[in-house]
Image (cartoon, coloured by chain):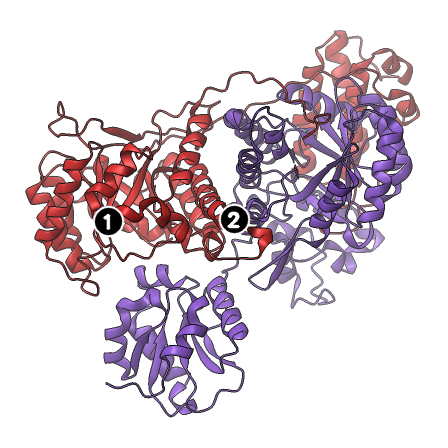
Amino acid sequence: MAKPKDIELLLNKDLLEKLAKFQAIELEDVEIELEEIEFSVEGGRGGGISSPLLARMGFEFALIRDSANRITSLLGGPASPMGMPAPQPQPAAPGLAPAAPAAKPTELIPETMGVPVGDYPGSIVEVKLGATRAEGGTRATSYVIGGEKVLPFFNFQAPMLNKPVIALDVFDWPKVPLSKAVKMHFREYLEDTAEWARVCVDKYGAEMINVHLLTIDPLIEDAPPKAALKTVESVLEAVDVPLSIGGCGDPQKDYAVFKAICENIEGERLLINSVTLDMDIEGTARLVKDHDNCVIAFTSMDVNKARELNRKLYDFVPKDQILMDTTTAALGYGLDYAFTVMERCRIAGLKGDPELNHPMSSGTTNAWAAREAWMKMGPEFAPRELRGPIWETVTGMTLLLAGVDYFMMMHPAAVDALKTIINHLMSNDKPVEPTEWVSVRM
Amino acid sequence: MPAKELSPIEIYQKLPRTNCGECGEANCMAFAAKLVNREALLADCKPLVEPENKEAYNELWALLKPAVKAVELGVGENALTIGGEYVFHRHEFTYFHEPAIAIDVSDEMSDEEFELRVKVLNDFSYEYIGMQLTLDMLSVRSTSGDPETFAAAVRKADELTQKPLILCALNPDVMRKGLEVAGDGRPLIYAATKDNWREMAELAIQYGCPLVASSPQDLDTLKSLTHTLEAYGVEDIVMDPGTAPNHHMAANLNNLVKLRWQSVNEEEEHLGYPILGLPLVAWAVEEEDTIINEWNEAVLGALCIDRFVDVMIIHGISGWALLPQIILRNNIYTDPRKPVSVEPELVVFGEPDELAPVMLTTNFALTYYTVASDIESAKVDSYLLVVDSEGMSVESAVAGRKMTADTVAEALANFKVGDRVKHRHLVIPGRSARLSGEIQELSGWTVSVGPLDSSGIAKFIDEKWTPFPEE
């Protein structure tokens, strides 16, 4: 007797592929295929396969009958999702049809499910953030991110090599508009960026700090690069985790400030956040390269722009010093774009696109741009103290699944929640017991 | 065949090629393109439904059918379709049917709690970019294990809501009682397992209802079940790979990914069915408080929505936890082939006179609808200039140089805003503050920076607006 699986393979591969690709197959062909199986099964006895014989074949018979059903259902199956009327059925195979009513399986048909194969020639480059004393800096830890060879958390294909890292945002401008739910955790530290950072690390478990230098904005205080440098130095002093350094969005001013910081702080492998297409790319890139820092290449939700910026950076910076950020939009405010652009970048990188295979970063704090995250709403949506952090968590988790390796976040509860999610997703795919829930009184 | 691999040519070759135009398209090629995009129905082609074209019709039907079968739940006005999907990643084509969200009740709940939950299901509605987002189904669970108790609960459910039901009981005797009450409403039956599949299959066939094949944490057995149920004659199947509490997130994700990958990318037999997710298992853990359970459930729900689940049952009914899930669902199931934008134009609110405010926003649909609804509810007679930002929000458009002083000045001129008002005073969004100087220079209009969020428009106009601000 052939194993049921062999029979299935023969039926599936040959017949179904033909069905899918070529003109309609006459049902005599089905007979022929069945005969061939019978032939190989019975070692040359050949001859047509009779219904009584099939009936004695137990579940193998069910298999064959089912395959025949499948074929007829391809020719005359059920209604389609678009509401098209179903095709008109062809007559069933003679010789098989009379046996069908008796053919209901009496026991489970054994099956093995295929496992998706990750066929990716490319891999994401690894980037090291921060530097310990041993590495020439003063940080207690440094992180390596990236290095993926498969889609995010496809643990059955390959484990995640490096854990995504979460930074908390701090701002050097006390008047930065923060929602109430966020502000309540940091109110006492708004005037003191270093202290704010220290609380983020000590109390809220920040793995890195992202220092937003807003006061340098010509529209805010137009603070000189020197002042920004001082702020960064004070944060470096206050915490022992790696830093990323955020500009204000003004291309000229950001470059001037990054220059002052890179030229005066050596060995810390800072993450410059960010370089954009309208900045002095060469100048910024050289600062990164010459002082052994890293940089976030920031573009606005456009795969081609992301590629273009990376390509321009390659002239000056080694690949393993570049992260890419294709813009984070909040849940409800364009998250679908952000998600899909990131997912496309990651897939392209894994497929071997040499210009998109970088770890990705996300300004997940943007989740708070959604009014649902902070606005007073009806009592059915209260309390907003929970609505905000779950908003940031869901935004972050969605982008984690798209491939983000570095998160810049705002709310301590969201940071904690996303960290937990990451830990759970990193854990090995051990056998899990079924969860009883139907009879549970919740 | 996966939708992403179909070309209009392939379809065109199998069409009658009469160019008769009866389908409403100019020619058969245009119709073929619509078919490939699933924007037209095969039956729209009149010659194709003639008997002599039966073969071609059937071939086209097989080519165009989705990898994940579309399964209808419920009957009548509230019936809904799940599944009917073609691709793994949304950008490969689009997702078609949002996962249905069912609210959980059980047959031992107090009347008060039962009714409250059904009320939330029936009444929950959130307006989002011109749409009403709602909940879809009621899931009735037998915690009692008693057939009569279950029947009574199903009866109550059937009376209190028109929305489709999920009946949850693993004992076929209990299920039979439930189906005797509500079996004509095409509820989803939960579930056939490796132990009870034959009785459940009989019930599903007898009542013509879709049936969940449940094999938590064992995908081989799940496939055995779907295969066996097919062979038994069950046509509409939903797959339950099991959802485990949050610390098993990796297993949850891996199960979902494997199932959908194999059905869509490998077209593996017996797996082309919608998937059931069970975020409510977050409540099946001991010694947690309700807020933590509800939070964990929302996280599991988001995972289900992000990763291929087609119908899910949730226990929590707090708005703060439901809202992110239904909005995420809307986002992920938005057609990525269509830009979410509105036409750039000058929109008139109320009856503005020549001194009325002129405000500015971008043509990202979400931004536009949010701003428009705020202006409407504030009853500000005004003009809103919607500039073409290629469908980006204000913040992204400014950062990405999609909205610049140039595009704003151009829009002011193109839409002849100066002909509508006597003043030259433009209010721009707070998030585009950095453009104020340049806009002023290029357009000659005086620029005021408005609030960061459009909910502040009423207050801003009330307190700060004047047509002729001092220089």
Is residue B276 in view from this perspective? yes
Q: Which amino acid, mark 2?
A: Pro
Circle 1 chain: A
Distance (Cα) linking label 1 and label 2: 35 Å
The correct choice, above or below, for B412 with respect to A186 in the image is below
The residue that appears at 61% across and 61% down in the rendered structure is B131
Compared to residue B43, the image places residue A231 above or below, namely: above
Residue drawn 27% across and 84% down? B444
Question: In front here: B109 or A361?
Answer: B109
Quarter of the figure with the C terminus of chain B: bottom left
Helix, strand or loop at label 1? It is strand
**Residue B404: percent from the left, percent from the top?**
30, 69
The residue indicated by pointer 2 is A383
Indicate left or right for B167 with B423 as reference. right
Q: Colour of chain A?
A: red
Q: Quadrant of the N terminus of chain B?
A: top right
Question: Which amino acid is tagged 1?
Answer: Ser
Residue under the image location 55 percent in, 31 percent down? B257
In the picture, measured across the screen, residue B40 lies left or right of residue A403, that is right
Q: Which chain is purple?
A: B
- Mark 1 closeness class: few <14, some 14–19, many ≥20 residues within 10 Å: many
Whether residue A93 is visible, yes or no, is: no
Residue designated by label 1: A274
- Mark 2 — on which chain does it sit? A
In the image, residue A186 sits, relative to residue B271, either above or below, namely below
Residue at disc 2, secondary structure: loop
